Amino acid sequence: MRAAAPAVILFLVLVTAQAANYRRFVDYMIRGTDVEGFCEQCESVLQLLKNDPQGTLDSALNACKQTQYFTPRICDEEHRMYAGSVVQIIEQLNTSFDQACKFLSNGACGAPDIDAYKWTVHLDSIQDDATFHPQHFRHLEQEWKNTHLSMLHITDTHFDEDYEVGAAADCNEPICCTKYQPQATDPENFAAPWGYPFGKACNVPFRTVENMLQDIDRSRHVSFGIWTGDISPHAYINMTDERARRDIQETTAVIKRYLGQAKIYPAIGNHDAFPGRLFPQPGVNAAEYSVKPLYEEMWNLWYEWLPADQERIFKYGGYYTAKVHDRLRIIALNTNFCYTYNWWLVLGANDPARQLQWMITTLEEARRYRERVFIIGHIPPGSSACNSYWEEAYFKIVTKFQHTITGQFFAHMHTDEVILDYSDPMDKEKPTSVLYVTPAVTTSWSGMPEYRIYQTELGEVVDIETYFLNLTTANAGYFKIRESVHEKVREDFKDMSPFRRRAMEKVLYGVPHWELGYSARKSYGLKKFDAAHWHQLIKAFDTDDNLLQTFYKHYRQFRENVVRLEKPCDEACKKKLIANMTSKRSTRARELQR
Ligand SMILES: [Zn+2]
Ligand SMILES: [Zn+2]
């Protein structure tokens, strides 16, 4: 998820600026406003860092505490987590600060124009799907052993081992609802047993993730699954490499326990490394911050799900391909190489780990064998979180292989949306590709915990079922007894064995049930799930307000306070929603056209 401020930046700017400038800078990085603040500060901050990295970061730590933008302990934790990587990066930075700042702002301070940042993939010699005989892409039932495949998609679980029932959901730190916050008195501010439904910075307890998997195991048919990352919480306090690994191990184990029959295909999220967001690309000197050991550990945990011949490429760049069916292939991307907050990329972002070039070769191969391809990944190209040049290259490839690629499944946004790309950006009516953003399991800045099943026929999506846990209902039982038992339970839990505690929790918290939130076919009346039909649906927002309001409630994952409103999405909200669902390159091209 886009989540909290890029931590390191908070420190940097404090060194040079008064609180007001600092605020302007941070406001841009968090909310995308006041870009001038960032652009004014960036070069001088980089200069200071280059001259004296450690000293600059240390004085930045003091300044962070003095201005009280965050609590002192968060200032300390950010310094502990990020300072070492920043020093390692700045020492290797060879590009001009002007170019680096343009890159770091993802073009907001002007477009970078050196090869390290401005690049594209070589596609000229690659044949376009459009020039193939249409018969090549027509699939017949007899070619598929199972024409119908139900694909589970789980993402952004972010379970928080520090989640504590009763902790305040409203706090002045990046993550609330944990044992580090005081207990809440107001029920609307109370971290409830199964999660907090009002869209604050609260992740979910492990029991919610486990309960979801039990529900899938018990109630749904799944042919195979995809799992697109963000396993650890957005935590700072006591977050360590060891804990991040443990989160991955525990989540993998519980998935295997309940979904043992199905193969699960993972993709790596920005929260899956320690420190979060920072994934050094092959070729830089990452020293102790290398993610190679992480890839190795992931491979050891996941190898049973993946083809053995993908070991080398996975351990090199965290990406791979796998056939899930005779005629269906998955390409799992490591989108941390497009992530705008992956600071390592400032050392050179030209197709990191040669991933997109590999994607082209893999797609050519798949096309030759008449396979259909699903692309999966964490950060959606086309969203603000993905670097513009990477995005441009990605969509060029997707356009070239538009009949081979029959699905794109991403995550990270903690919302339920689609992103449309217009291959001829001058023609607003001609979308060529639709990319799905699957909603999160965590409630952090989203709504109710959700998972999805994509129903597919012959490798094409024919319906999307989104299941959710209604937290209001799930927590209702505990709220009835809360006042009389809560303090006593807290006291009793302190000395209880984990086994007994779990048994007690079951009695106190009950066992909730997940339900179908909506089927896209029924709810939107979609007959076909291609880009053209999604485009028509979004266009209909102008004339059909009911449709817009329904879509928006789904977008917010049935967040309690959104669902309560009669018209949660007004005109400004609609504009923003549509802008979010259009790839950045399409938007840029349209602006040039004006
Ligand atoms: Zn996330
Ligand atoms: Zn994410």
Image: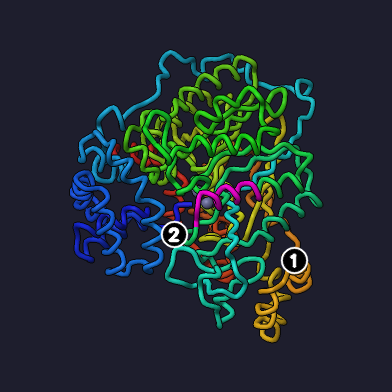
Q: Position of residue 308 (x, y in %)?
A: 66, 25
Observer-nearest of 140 and 449: 449
Q: Position of residue 423 (x, y in %)?
A: 44, 31
**Label 2 Cα crowd, 10 Å radius (few <14 / some 14-19 / many 20+):** few
**Label 1 Cα crowd, 10 Å radius (few <14 / some 14-19 / many 20+):** some
For badge 1, the amino acid type reads Arg
Q: Residue 241 colored magenta?
A: yes
The stretch of residues the image draws in magenta is: 239-250
Residue that extends furthest to the right in the rendered view of this protein = 218
For badge 2, the amino acid type reads Cys
Magenta region, mostly helix, strand or loop? helix
Determine the residue positioned at 25% across, 59% down. Answer: 59
Residue occupied by mark 2: 573
Secondary element under disc 1, as helix, strand or loop, is: helix
Q: Is residue 591 visible?
A: no
Are dots 2 and 1 in contact, CB under 8 Å? no
Determine the residue positioned at 39% across, 55% down. Answer: 80
Q: Position of residue 381 (x, y in %)?
A: 46, 39
Secondary element under disc 2, as helix, strand or loop, is: helix
